Structures are given as structure tokens and as C-alpha cells.
Image: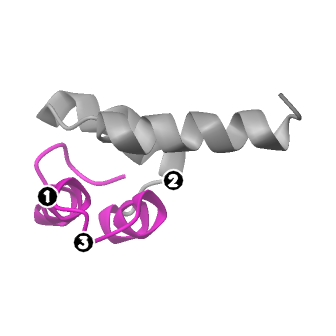
Amino acid sequence: MPDERSPALLAAVKAYELHELTAGAAAELAGLSKLAFLQRLGEFGVPVFDMTPEELERDVAAARRAAGR
């Protein structure tokens, strides 16, 4: 498991924060499972979900349509 401040982990967190890598790709870069990577994001103040209100509304509407509501 990488050290808390390993260059790979720091690079992965920053790339995820900048939307340059997906969570899965960033986790792989950091040498962590996707779940472990997502759990570590809070240590760096990086949100797991980073959506605009409009994106959230669009996703909720799509989910409602898919559920038949």
C-alpha cells in the first residue's frame, strides 16, 4: 500500500480533482482499490461527487424517467 504522501497518490488525487482521470484510473495510478482511493479523497479535501446543480438535476430526471416516474 502506498505511503500517505506518496507521489503517485498525490498525482492521482490531483488528476481526479481536475477531471483528468476517472476514479478507477486514478486508483490504479495510486496503487489502491477504487473504494480505498475514494475513501482517501476526503483526506485531501477532494469531493467524491463534483456535480453542478444542473448536472444533478439532469441525472435525477433521467433516473426518474428510467424508473417510470
> Along the line of sight, which residue is nearer the eye, 30 or 18?
18
Q: Is residue 62 above or below residue 2?
A: above
Give the labeled residue for mark 2: 33
Which region is colored magenta?
Answer: 1-30
Using the image, tell me which numbered label, if any, was put on residue 14.
1
Residue 14, horizontal then vertical, whole percent: 13, 58
Using the image, tell me which numbered label, if any, was put on residue 56.
none
Could you classify mark 2 by the number of other residues whose Cα lies within 10 Å: few (under 14), some (14-19), or many (20 or more)?
A: some
> Within the magenta stretch, is there residue 19?
yes
Visible in this render: residue 48?
no
Q: What is the distance, in whole Å, between disc 1 and disc 3 at their CAs?
A: 9 Å
Give the mark toward the camera: 1 or 2: 1
Give the mark toward the camera: 1 or 3: 3
Amino acid type, callout 2: Ser
Amino acid type, callout 1: Lys
Q: Is residue 61 above or below residue 27?
A: above
User: Residue shown at 19%/29% (left/top)?
Assistant: 43
Q: What is the distance, in whole Å, between disc 3 and disc 2 at their CAs?
A: 18 Å
Q: What is the distance, in whole Å, between disc 1 and disc 2 at their CAs?
A: 17 Å
Q: Is residue 39 left or right of residue 41?
A: right
Q: Is residue 50 above or below residue 6?
A: above
Amino acid type, callout 3: Glu
Magenta stretch: dominant secondary structure = helix
Give the labeled residue for mark 3: 20
Could you classify mark 1 by the number of other residues whose Cα lies within 10 Å: few (under 14), some (14-19), or many (20 or more)?
A: some
Which quadrant, please, contains the C terminus?
Answer: top right
Residue 3, horizontal then vertical, whole percent: 20, 49
> Along the line of sight, which residue is nearer the eye, 54 or 33?
54
